[in-house]
Image: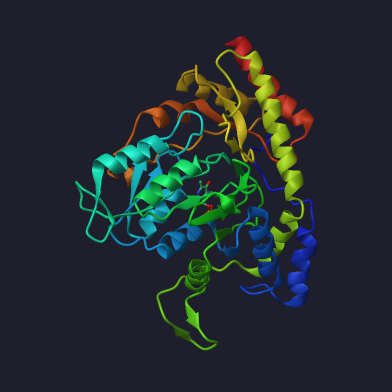
Amino acid sequence: MIPLAIPNLDGNEGLYLQACVEENFVSTVGRFVTELEDRLAKRTGSDHAVCVSQGTTGLHAALTSVGVNTGDLVIIPTLTFIASANAVSHCKAVPWLMDITENSWTLDPDLLENALNTQCHKDADGQCIHTESGRRVAAIMPVHTMGHPPDMDRITSVAKMWNLPVVADAAAALGTRYKNKEVGQMGATLNVMSFNGNKIITTGGGGVILGQDDALMKYVRHLTTTARVGSGYDHDIIGFNYRMTNVQAAIGVGQMEILEQFLTAKKRIADRYTQAWKKIDGAEGFRSESWGESNHWFSGIFLPAHSAETVSALREHLRESGVDARPFWKPMHWQTPYLDAPKTLTGIADQVWEQILPLPCSTQLTDHEQQTVIDATLSFFDEA
Ligand SMILES: Cc1ncc(COP(=O)(O)O)c(C=O)c1O
Protein backbone atom coordinates (compact mmCIF):
# COMPACT_ATOMS: atom_id res chain seq x y z
CA MET A 1 0.00 0.00 0.00
CA ILE A 2 1.40 3.43 -0.90
CA PRO A 3 1.04 5.22 2.45
CA LEU A 4 -0.76 8.51 2.95
CA ALA A 5 1.81 10.45 4.97
CA ILE A 6 4.63 8.80 6.87
CA PRO A 7 7.71 10.22 8.57
CA ASN A 8 10.87 10.76 6.56
CA LEU A 9 13.82 10.13 8.88
CA ASP A 10 16.60 10.45 6.30
CA GLY A 11 18.64 13.06 8.16
CA ASN A 12 20.69 13.01 11.37
CA GLU A 13 17.82 11.82 13.57
CA GLY A 14 19.51 8.50 14.45
CA LEU A 15 22.82 10.19 15.17
CA TYR A 16 21.19 12.69 17.53
CA LEU A 17 19.17 9.99 19.29
CA GLN A 18 22.40 8.12 19.87
CA ALA A 19 23.89 11.32 21.33
CA CYS A 20 20.99 11.55 23.81
CA VAL A 21 21.82 8.05 25.03
CA GLU A 22 25.58 8.60 25.12
CA GLU A 23 25.22 11.93 26.93
CA ASN A 24 22.60 10.41 29.26
CA PHE A 25 20.13 13.21 28.52
CA VAL A 26 16.83 11.61 27.56
CA SER A 27 14.38 13.55 29.70
CA THR A 28 12.89 17.03 29.76
CA VAL A 29 16.05 19.07 29.70
CA GLY A 30 18.89 18.86 27.24
CA ARG A 31 20.64 20.62 24.43
CA PHE A 32 18.30 19.35 21.71
CA VAL A 33 15.22 20.91 23.33
CA THR A 34 16.95 24.29 23.43
CA GLU A 35 18.26 23.93 19.90
CA LEU A 36 14.88 22.90 18.52
CA GLU A 37 13.24 25.89 20.22
CA ASP A 38 15.85 28.24 18.75
CA ARG A 39 15.44 26.80 15.26
CA LEU A 40 11.63 26.91 15.40
CA ALA A 41 11.54 30.49 16.67
CA LYS A 42 13.91 31.59 13.89
CA ARG A 43 12.15 29.68 11.08
CA THR A 44 8.68 30.94 12.04
CA GLY A 45 9.66 34.56 12.75
CA SER A 46 8.72 34.20 16.41
CA ASP A 47 10.50 35.82 19.34
CA HIS A 48 9.93 32.78 21.55
CA ALA A 49 9.26 29.05 21.23
CA VAL A 50 8.34 26.61 23.98
CA CYS A 51 8.39 22.95 22.98
CA VAL A 52 5.71 20.70 24.45
CA SER A 53 4.69 17.05 24.49
CA GLN A 54 1.97 17.29 21.78
CA GLY A 55 0.04 19.76 19.67
CA THR A 56 -3.03 19.05 21.81
CA THR A 57 -1.27 19.79 25.09
CA GLY A 58 0.21 22.89 23.43
CA LEU A 59 -3.26 24.12 22.52
CA HIS A 60 -4.52 23.41 26.03
CA ALA A 61 -1.63 25.33 27.58
CA ALA A 62 -1.92 28.20 25.08
CA LEU A 63 -5.65 28.63 25.71
CA THR A 64 -5.09 28.48 29.46
CA SER A 65 -2.30 31.05 29.17
CA VAL A 66 -4.56 33.60 27.46
CA GLY A 67 -7.14 33.14 30.22
CA VAL A 68 -9.68 30.66 28.80
CA ASN A 69 -11.58 29.28 31.75
CA THR A 70 -14.56 27.23 32.90
CA GLY A 71 -17.76 28.03 30.99
CA ASP A 72 -16.15 30.33 28.43
CA LEU A 73 -16.75 30.09 24.69
CA VAL A 74 -13.87 29.75 22.23
CA ILE A 75 -14.62 30.26 18.54
CA ILE A 76 -13.23 27.54 16.25
CA PRO A 77 -13.97 26.48 12.68
CA THR A 78 -16.20 23.40 12.56
CA LEU A 79 -13.93 21.79 9.97
CA THR A 80 -10.87 20.81 11.95
CA PHE A 81 -9.24 17.86 13.66
CA ILE A 82 -11.01 17.09 16.94
CA ALA A 83 -7.94 18.13 18.96
CA SER A 84 -8.83 21.82 18.38
CA ALA A 85 -12.25 21.34 20.01
CA ASN A 86 -10.90 18.98 22.68
CA ALA A 87 -8.28 21.50 23.78
CA VAL A 88 -11.13 23.96 24.42
CA SER A 89 -12.98 21.28 26.40
CA HIS A 90 -9.83 20.49 28.40
CA CYS A 91 -10.09 24.11 29.67
CA LYS A 92 -13.70 23.29 30.70
CA ALA A 93 -14.76 25.82 28.07
CA VAL A 94 -17.11 25.26 25.12
CA PRO A 95 -16.24 25.53 21.42
CA TRP A 96 -18.47 27.85 19.37
CA LEU A 97 -18.39 26.20 15.96
CA MET A 98 -18.31 28.45 12.92
CA ASP A 99 -18.29 27.70 9.23
CA ILE A 100 -15.49 28.04 6.71
CA THR A 101 -14.91 29.76 3.38
CA GLU A 102 -15.11 27.91 0.08
CA ASN A 103 -11.44 28.33 -0.80
CA SER A 104 -9.47 28.50 2.45
CA TRP A 105 -11.47 25.68 4.08
CA THR A 106 -11.09 27.46 7.39
CA LEU A 107 -12.73 30.11 9.56
CA ASP A 108 -14.88 32.57 7.58
CA PRO A 109 -13.96 36.10 8.80
CA ASP A 110 -17.23 37.66 7.54
CA LEU A 111 -19.25 35.10 9.44
CA LEU A 112 -17.07 35.63 12.51
CA GLU A 113 -17.53 39.41 12.41
CA ASN A 114 -21.26 39.16 11.82
CA ALA A 115 -21.77 36.56 14.57
CA LEU A 116 -19.94 38.69 17.11
CA ASN A 117 -21.77 41.86 16.04
CA THR A 118 -25.23 40.31 16.14
CA GLN A 119 -24.96 37.79 18.97
CA CYS A 120 -22.57 39.41 21.44
CA HIS A 121 -22.16 42.57 23.48
CA LYS A 122 -19.42 44.06 25.60
CA ASP A 123 -19.98 44.10 29.37
CA ALA A 124 -18.93 46.92 31.68
CA ASP A 125 -15.37 45.53 31.80
CA GLY A 126 -15.14 45.43 28.00
CA GLN A 127 -15.44 41.62 27.89
CA CYS A 128 -17.18 39.97 24.97
CA ILE A 129 -20.39 38.28 26.16
CA HIS A 130 -22.54 35.93 24.10
CA THR A 131 -25.88 37.58 24.81
CA GLU A 132 -28.21 34.55 24.71
CA SER A 133 -26.13 32.21 26.87
CA GLY A 134 -24.45 34.86 29.02
CA ARG A 135 -21.14 33.06 28.43
CA ARG A 136 -17.94 35.03 27.97
CA VAL A 137 -16.24 34.63 24.60
CA ALA A 138 -12.61 34.17 25.64
CA ALA A 139 -10.64 33.53 22.45
CA ILE A 140 -10.68 32.85 18.71
CA MET A 141 -8.88 29.79 17.37
CA PRO A 142 -8.38 29.88 13.59
CA VAL A 143 -6.96 26.70 12.06
CA HIS A 144 -4.45 26.36 9.22
CA THR A 145 -6.34 23.68 7.29
CA MET A 146 -4.06 21.25 5.41
CA GLY A 147 -1.30 23.86 5.80
CA HIS A 148 -3.29 26.69 4.15
CA PRO A 149 -3.48 29.81 6.34
CA PRO A 150 -6.69 31.49 7.50
CA ASP A 151 -7.25 35.14 6.53
CA MET A 152 -5.29 36.32 9.56
CA ASP A 153 -5.48 40.10 8.90
CA ARG A 154 -9.27 39.97 8.89
CA ILE A 155 -9.47 37.65 11.88
CA THR A 156 -7.01 39.59 14.02
CA SER A 157 -8.72 42.88 13.23
CA VAL A 158 -12.11 41.48 14.34
CA ALA A 159 -10.39 40.06 17.44
CA LYS A 160 -8.96 43.48 18.24
CA MET A 161 -12.40 45.12 18.07
CA TRP A 162 -13.63 42.66 20.71
CA ASN A 163 -10.42 42.52 22.81
CA LEU A 164 -10.08 38.82 22.08
CA PRO A 165 -6.82 36.87 22.00
CA VAL A 166 -6.15 34.71 18.94
CA VAL A 167 -4.65 31.27 19.51
CA ALA A 168 -3.94 29.82 16.08
CA ASP A 169 -4.05 26.07 15.61
CA ALA A 170 -1.08 26.00 13.27
CA ALA A 171 -0.62 22.27 13.92
CA ALA A 172 0.42 21.55 10.35
CA ALA A 173 1.63 24.99 9.31
CA LEU A 174 5.42 24.91 9.59
CA GLY A 175 6.57 26.68 6.42
CA THR A 176 3.12 28.12 5.62
CA ARG A 177 3.07 31.81 4.63
CA TYR A 178 0.38 34.48 4.65
CA LYS A 179 0.96 37.64 2.59
CA ASN A 180 4.68 36.78 2.64
CA LYS A 181 4.69 36.48 6.41
CA GLU A 182 5.78 33.47 8.42
CA VAL A 183 3.45 31.93 11.02
CA GLY A 184 4.95 33.90 13.92
CA GLN A 185 4.37 37.21 12.11
CA MET A 186 0.71 36.69 11.19
CA GLY A 187 -0.66 38.55 14.22
CA ALA A 188 -1.93 35.71 16.44
CA THR A 189 -1.33 36.08 20.17
CA LEU A 190 0.01 32.50 20.23
CA ASN A 191 0.55 29.84 17.57
CA VAL A 192 0.63 26.13 18.26
CA MET A 193 2.20 23.47 16.03
CA SER A 194 2.16 19.68 16.18
CA PHE A 195 4.99 17.32 15.31
CA ASN A 196 3.13 14.02 15.34
CA GLY A 197 4.05 11.38 12.81
CA ASN A 198 2.23 12.76 9.79
CA LYS A 199 3.23 16.43 10.10
CA ILE A 200 5.78 18.34 7.98
CA ILE A 201 8.39 17.49 10.60
CA THR A 202 7.92 14.94 13.33
CA THR A 203 9.34 14.43 16.79
CA GLY A 204 7.42 11.18 17.20
CA GLY A 205 4.87 13.13 19.20
CA GLY A 206 5.35 16.74 20.16
CA GLY A 207 4.50 20.34 19.56
CA VAL A 208 5.51 23.93 20.08
CA ILE A 209 3.91 27.13 21.33
CA LEU A 210 5.18 30.23 19.52
CA GLY A 211 4.69 33.84 20.51
CA GLN A 212 6.07 37.37 20.43
CA ASP A 213 5.05 38.64 23.87
CA ASP A 214 7.94 38.24 26.35
CA ALA A 215 5.81 38.12 29.51
CA LEU A 216 3.15 35.83 28.05
CA MET A 217 5.73 33.39 26.71
CA LYS A 218 7.52 33.39 30.06
CA TYR A 219 4.19 32.39 31.58
CA VAL A 220 3.70 29.69 28.91
CA ARG A 221 7.09 28.19 29.81
CA HIS A 222 6.27 28.33 33.52
CA LEU A 223 2.80 26.80 33.04
CA THR A 224 4.03 23.93 30.85
CA THR A 225 6.85 22.97 33.24
CA THR A 226 4.80 22.39 36.44
CA ALA A 227 5.04 26.06 37.47
CA ARG A 228 8.11 25.39 39.51
CA VAL A 229 9.67 28.27 41.40
CA GLY A 230 13.37 27.97 42.14
CA SER A 231 15.23 24.66 42.24
CA GLY A 232 13.22 23.04 45.04
CA TYR A 233 9.68 21.68 45.03
CA ASP A 234 7.85 24.99 45.17
CA HIS A 235 5.06 25.59 42.66
CA ASP A 236 3.03 28.80 42.55
CA ILE A 237 0.08 27.78 40.33
CA ILE A 238 -1.46 24.53 39.06
CA GLY A 239 0.87 23.90 36.15
CA PHE A 240 1.08 21.23 33.47
CA ASN A 241 3.84 18.68 32.94
CA TYR A 242 3.84 19.23 29.17
CA ARG A 243 7.55 19.65 28.44
CA MET A 244 9.05 17.98 25.36
CA THR A 245 11.81 15.46 26.07
CA ASN A 246 15.36 15.67 24.74
CA VAL A 247 14.72 12.40 22.83
CA GLN A 248 11.77 13.93 20.96
CA ALA A 249 13.73 17.12 20.32
CA ALA A 250 16.74 15.19 18.99
CA ILE A 251 14.52 13.82 16.22
CA GLY A 252 13.11 17.32 15.69
CA VAL A 253 16.55 18.91 15.22
CA GLY A 254 17.40 16.27 12.62
CA GLN A 255 14.12 17.05 10.88
CA MET A 256 14.63 20.82 10.97
CA GLU A 257 17.96 20.43 9.18
CA ILE A 258 16.10 19.07 6.15
CA LEU A 259 12.85 21.01 6.44
CA GLU A 260 13.43 23.01 3.26
CA GLN A 261 13.82 19.76 1.27
CA PHE A 262 10.55 18.53 2.76
CA LEU A 263 8.76 21.74 1.74
CA THR A 264 10.12 21.52 -1.79
CA ALA A 265 8.97 17.89 -2.05
CA LYS A 266 5.50 18.71 -0.68
CA LYS A 267 5.05 21.49 -3.25
CA ARG A 268 6.24 19.30 -6.12
CA ILE A 269 3.75 16.57 -5.13
CA ALA A 270 0.85 19.04 -4.77
CA ASP A 271 1.60 20.71 -8.12
CA ARG A 272 1.74 17.36 -9.89
CA TYR A 273 -1.66 16.31 -8.52
CA THR A 274 -3.19 19.67 -9.48
CA GLN A 275 -1.85 19.30 -13.00
CA ALA A 276 -3.11 15.70 -13.32
CA TRP A 277 -6.69 16.48 -12.27
CA LYS A 278 -7.15 18.84 -15.23
CA LYS A 279 -8.05 15.69 -17.14
CA ILE A 280 -11.06 14.99 -14.88
CA ASP A 281 -14.30 16.99 -15.13
CA GLY A 282 -15.30 18.53 -11.81
CA ALA A 283 -11.99 17.76 -10.10
CA GLU A 284 -9.13 19.95 -8.96
CA GLY A 285 -6.18 20.04 -6.59
CA PHE A 286 -6.55 21.51 -3.11
CA ARG A 287 -7.56 25.15 -3.21
CA SER A 288 -5.51 28.16 -2.29
CA GLU A 289 -6.31 31.85 -1.76
CA SER A 290 -4.15 34.49 -3.50
CA TRP A 291 -2.92 35.68 -0.08
CA GLY A 292 -2.08 32.23 1.19
CA GLU A 293 0.97 30.10 0.51
CA SER A 294 0.28 26.60 1.75
CA ASN A 295 3.12 24.37 2.88
CA HIS A 296 1.09 21.58 1.18
CA TRP A 297 1.17 19.47 4.31
CA PHE A 298 -1.54 17.40 2.68
CA SER A 299 -2.37 17.32 -0.99
CA GLY A 300 -4.85 15.28 -2.94
CA ILE A 301 -7.97 15.69 -5.02
CA PHE A 302 -10.98 17.97 -4.49
CA LEU A 303 -14.18 16.93 -6.24
CA PRO A 304 -16.63 19.83 -5.91
CA ALA A 305 -18.87 18.57 -8.71
CA HIS A 306 -19.11 15.02 -7.41
CA SER A 307 -21.25 13.38 -4.75
CA ALA A 308 -20.00 11.96 -1.46
CA GLU A 309 -20.89 8.50 -2.83
CA THR A 310 -18.56 8.99 -5.83
CA VAL A 311 -15.72 10.13 -3.56
CA SER A 312 -16.29 7.13 -1.32
CA ALA A 313 -16.26 4.78 -4.34
CA LEU A 314 -13.03 6.42 -5.56
CA ARG A 315 -11.50 5.88 -2.14
CA GLU A 316 -12.40 2.18 -2.26
CA HIS A 317 -11.05 1.88 -5.81
CA LEU A 318 -7.76 3.46 -4.72
CA ARG A 319 -7.41 1.15 -1.75
CA GLU A 320 -8.03 -1.85 -4.00
CA SER A 321 -5.27 -0.46 -6.25
CA GLY A 322 -2.81 -0.35 -3.34
CA VAL A 323 -3.16 3.37 -2.60
CA ASP A 324 -3.93 4.59 0.90
CA ALA A 325 -6.79 7.09 0.74
CA ARG A 326 -8.85 8.09 3.75
CA PRO A 327 -11.83 10.32 4.52
CA PHE A 328 -11.02 13.88 5.52
CA TRP A 329 -11.95 15.47 8.89
CA LYS A 330 -15.60 15.15 9.76
CA PRO A 331 -16.88 18.55 10.97
CA MET A 332 -17.12 19.06 14.71
CA HIS A 333 -20.89 19.65 14.60
CA TRP A 334 -21.28 15.97 13.60
CA GLN A 335 -19.04 14.64 16.37
CA THR A 336 -20.84 13.04 19.33
CA PRO A 337 -19.16 15.20 22.03
CA TYR A 338 -20.00 18.42 20.17
CA LEU A 339 -23.55 17.83 18.88
CA ASP A 340 -24.87 20.38 21.37
CA ALA A 341 -22.09 22.95 20.97
CA PRO A 342 -23.25 26.39 19.81
CA LYS A 343 -22.91 26.75 16.05
CA THR A 344 -23.02 29.37 13.35
CA LEU A 345 -23.05 27.48 10.08
CA THR A 346 -23.56 28.35 6.42
CA GLY A 347 -23.44 24.83 4.98
CA ILE A 348 -20.01 25.10 3.35
CA ALA A 349 -18.27 22.63 5.68
CA ASP A 350 -21.11 20.17 5.12
CA GLN A 351 -20.78 20.65 1.38
CA VAL A 352 -17.01 20.21 1.06
CA TRP A 353 -15.78 17.82 3.71
CA GLU A 354 -16.82 14.71 1.81
CA GLN A 355 -15.46 16.07 -1.48
CA ILE A 356 -11.90 16.43 -0.16
CA LEU A 357 -9.74 13.34 -0.58
CA PRO A 358 -6.17 13.50 0.75
CA LEU A 359 -3.80 11.29 -1.27
CA PRO A 360 -0.32 9.94 -0.61
CA CYS A 361 2.02 12.87 -0.08
CA SER A 362 4.92 11.68 2.08
CA THR A 363 8.06 13.61 1.19
CA GLN A 364 9.77 10.39 0.05
CA LEU A 365 6.92 9.52 -2.36
CA THR A 366 8.64 8.62 -5.63
CA ASP A 367 7.52 9.89 -9.05
CA HIS A 368 6.66 6.31 -9.91
CA GLU A 369 4.48 5.90 -6.82
CA GLN A 370 2.73 9.19 -7.48
CA GLN A 371 2.10 8.12 -11.06
CA THR A 372 0.47 4.93 -9.69
CA VAL A 373 -1.86 7.10 -7.58
CA ILE A 374 -2.67 9.34 -10.55
CA ASP A 375 -3.25 6.40 -12.92
CA ALA A 376 -5.52 4.66 -10.42
CA THR A 377 -7.55 7.86 -10.02
CA LEU A 378 -7.81 8.48 -13.76
CA SER A 379 -8.83 4.87 -14.37
CA PHE A 380 -11.70 5.25 -11.86
CA PHE A 381 -13.12 8.17 -13.83
CA ASP A 382 -12.55 6.44 -17.20
CA GLU A 383 -14.51 3.46 -15.99
CA ALA A 384 -17.13 5.43 -14.08
C1 LIG B 1 -5.52 20.78 13.12
C2 LIG B 1 -4.87 19.97 14.19
N1 LIG B 1 -4.93 20.41 15.46
C3 LIG B 1 -4.34 19.75 16.46
C4 LIG B 1 -3.65 18.57 16.24
C5 LIG B 1 -3.13 17.82 17.43
O1 LIG B 1 -1.79 17.61 17.44
P1 LIG B 1 -1.18 16.34 18.26
O2 LIG B 1 -1.57 15.11 17.53
O3 LIG B 1 0.29 16.61 18.24
O4 LIG B 1 -1.74 16.40 19.64
C6 LIG B 1 -3.53 18.09 14.93
C7 LIG B 1 -2.75 16.89 14.58
O5 LIG B 1 -2.89 15.78 14.92
C8 LIG B 1 -4.17 18.79 13.88
O6 LIG B 1 -4.14 18.35 12.62
Residue 320 image offset from top left, x and y in percent: 62, 26
* Image vertical order of residue 95 relative to residue 269, above or below: below
* Image vertical order of residue 256 relative to residue 77, above or below: below
Residue at 49 percent across and 39 percent down: it is 151
Which sits in the foreground, 165 or 279? 165
Residue 144 image offset from top left, x and y in percent: 53, 43
Q: From the image, which quarter does the C terminus lie in?
A: top right
Q: Is residue 369 visible?
A: yes
Residue at 71 percent across and 43 percent down: it is 263
Residue 7 image offset from top left, x and y in percent: 69, 48
Q: From the image, which quarter does the N terminus lie in?
A: top right
Q: Residue furthest top?
A: 383
The chosen color scheme is rainbow
Answer left or right for 216 relative to 2.
left
* Image vertical order of residue 61 relative to residue 192, above or below: below
Residue at 50 percent across and 50 percent down: it is 169
Picture quadrant where residue 16 is located: bottom right
Which sits in the foreground, 128 or 270? 128
Q: Is residue 334 visible?
A: no
Answer left or right for 244 relative to 105.
right
Picture quadrant where residue 176 is located: top right
* Figure label count: 0
Residue 12 image offset from top left, x and y in percent: 79, 58
* Image vertical order of residue 90 relative to residue 215, above or below: above
